[in-house]
Image (cartoon, rainbow, N blue to C red):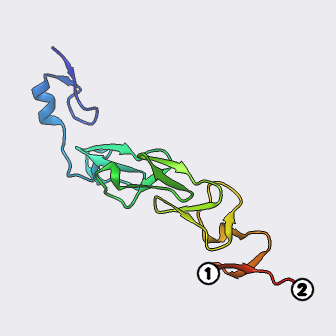
Amino acid sequence: MCVLCNPLSVRRCGSTQECMRTIKKCSPGFGISMQGECVLCDESAYCVGSQEFKCAKNSIAQQKGIYHNSQCICTAGYFQENGECVECRMFFICVNNAIQHCPTHMRTTKSGASWLSDCRCLPGFSVYSVVAGCEAIPIG
């Protein structure tokens, strides 16, 4: 019986036992390069059992060499909800997998916001400071 071996192995076809001997195993966080060497997994993926798996849609690895999908974080403008990266809702900013309110009397005007600078003062308020929020415009 012929069993398809790992395409990076020397043998393309053989018994299951022969294939197991020719497949290289790398440490967690490492995948196999086209040359058959163990290489650190890049920022778009995590590596387990010498295999590379892409992080979920709208997420990236926290650093090179990760080995579990929980180490993938949502990209700026997205937050984690039920294991998925969801676009940030209007009126909020999203950073580091979390959805956050803008400072006092401020809101965003679009979904997908990721910076404090995306927050704008509500009508009737002016910028006091981006960090502290907005203050009421004096009447008169």
Q: Position of residue 88 (x, y in %)?
A: 58, 54
* Mark 1 residue element: loop
- In the image, taking residue 92 as reference, residue 59 lies left or right, namely left
Residues packed near mark 1 inside 10 Å, few (<14), some (14 to 19) or many (20 plus): few
Q: Residue furthest right?
A: 140
The amino acid marked with disc number 2 is Gly
- In the image, taking residue 11 as reference, residue 122 lies left or right, namely right
Q: Is residue 4 above or below residue 25?
A: above
Label at residue 132: 1
Mark whose residue sits in front, 1 or 2: 2
Instruction: Report the residue at 19% width, 42% height from top.
Output: 24
Q: CA distance from mark 1 to mark 2?
A: 24 Å
Q: Is residue 62 above or below residue 123?
A: above
Nearer to us in this view, 95 or 108:
108
The amino acid marked with disc number 1 is Ala
- In the image, taking residue 139 as reference, residue 91 lies left or right, namely left
Query: Which corner quadrant holds the C terminus?
Result: bottom right
Residues packed near mark 2 inside 10 Å, few (<14), some (14 to 19) or many (20 plus): few
Nearer to us in this view, 100 or 36:
100
Q: Residue furthest top?
A: 1
Label at residue 54: none
Nearer to us in this view, 12 or 66:
66
Q: Position of residue 121 (x, y in %)?
A: 73, 71
Q: Position of residue 3 (x, y in %)?
A: 20, 20
Q: Position of residue 9 (x, y in %)?
A: 22, 35
Q: How many marks?
A: 2
Read off the residue under disc 2. 140
For residue 91, what is the image quadrant? bottom right
* Mark 2 residue element: loop
Instruction: Report the residue at 71% width, 69% height from top.
Output: 120
Instruction: Report the residue at 65% width, 54% height from top.
Output: 111
Nearer to us in this view, 105 or 38:
105
